[in-house]
Image (tube, rainbow, N blue to C red):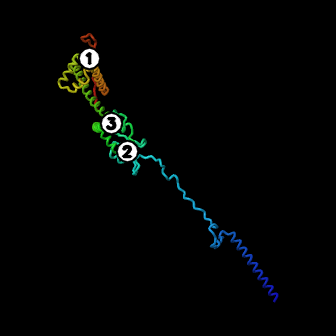
Amino acid sequence: MCAHNTQGLHTQGNLMLATKQHAEKTIQFLATSNHFLPVVPDDSSSSEEELEIPPAKKPCVSKTTSLPSNSKQSKCRSTKASSNRKCQNKWEKESTWLEYNADIDGAFCKICRTSERSLERTGGVWTTTPFRNWKKAVEKMKAHSQTNTHIKAYQGTLSTQHSGSVVQQLQNVAEQDRRINQVAVKSFFRCAHFLARHRIPNTTNFDGLVDLVVSCGGEHLRNFLDQTGRNAVYTSHVAVVEFMESLGRWVEESILKRLNKAQYFSFMADECTDIATIDEMAVFVVGKMVYQ
């Protein structure tokens, strides 16, 4: 009986020792394991000081999203209505002559500035000095549009649109004068060629022949002589000699062109003394033209 009890106690002691060792290993495993979860005590009497909650941070606002307050826009071309706007967009639609400059915050009259009336500027507003007094601006714009300076400038602009600019008008007049001069110069050459072809003394008969052409209906030649005047000496002896020399060069160049195109040519020269005892030589050239 004692032996049996002693064996039972020994077995019970071994079981308790094994249980203790198993408990220590379990605690050690839970302490080193990542799955260990702390136990929050269920104490309703715990104060809020023990569970401190960090204050929430303020939301971060980007400073670059806001537009600068000094952004510059053309007030007359602003699409948004504003109560403190000085120059309004509808003014430019109602007054087409209005020209607003946002850099200087002022308006000009583009008709008075660009028209020929701008030469009579007195340095007033709307021309050289910008208009900036926006109080009762509509009445002031209407008053400017009714001034004599603005009306004359507007009429000059309409005239320029119909007849072209001053430069264009001068070019048209110059082209018309050039054509008239060409017709008159051709008439002078025809008179000189007539005298030379009929072997008529040219220096003494050229002026009379020109007057005959004018009296027979040469209006273009009459207008040319009236505009230039006799001091232009288009009918003087010097002018006749220049006409003859020009005709001689033209005849010579035309003959040379024909000879250069000929397959072969021949020439004959003869010399004689004229009535003034001056030796004169005449050269005759005959060429054969070959056409394919």
Mark 2 sits on what residue?
Answer: 135
The answer to the question of whether label 3 and label 1 lie on touching residues, with beta carbons closer than 8 A, is: no
Q: Position of residue 69 (x, y in %)?
A: 47, 49
The answer to the question of whether label 2 and label 1 lie on touching residues, with beta carbons closer than 8 A, is: no
At 57% from the left and 60% from the top, the residue drawn is 57
Q: Nearer the viewer, mark 3 or mark 1?
A: 3
Q: Work out which quarter of the rendered image holds the C terminus and state it.
A: top left
- Amino acid, disc 3: Ser
Q: Secondary structure at mark 2?
A: loop
Toward the left, the furthest residue is 216
Q: Is residue 129 left or right of residue 231?
A: right
Establish if 201 lies above or below 15: above
Mark 1 sits on what residue?
Answer: 237
Toward the bottom, the furthest residue is 1
Residue 284 in sight:
no
**Distance of mark 3 from mark 1, alpha carbons?**
50 Å
Q: Position of residue 38 (x, y in %)?
A: 65, 70
Return the residue nearer the eye: 25 or 237.
Answer: 25
Q: Position of residue 283 (x, y in %)?
A: 28, 18
Q: Is residue 46 left or right of residue 98?
A: right
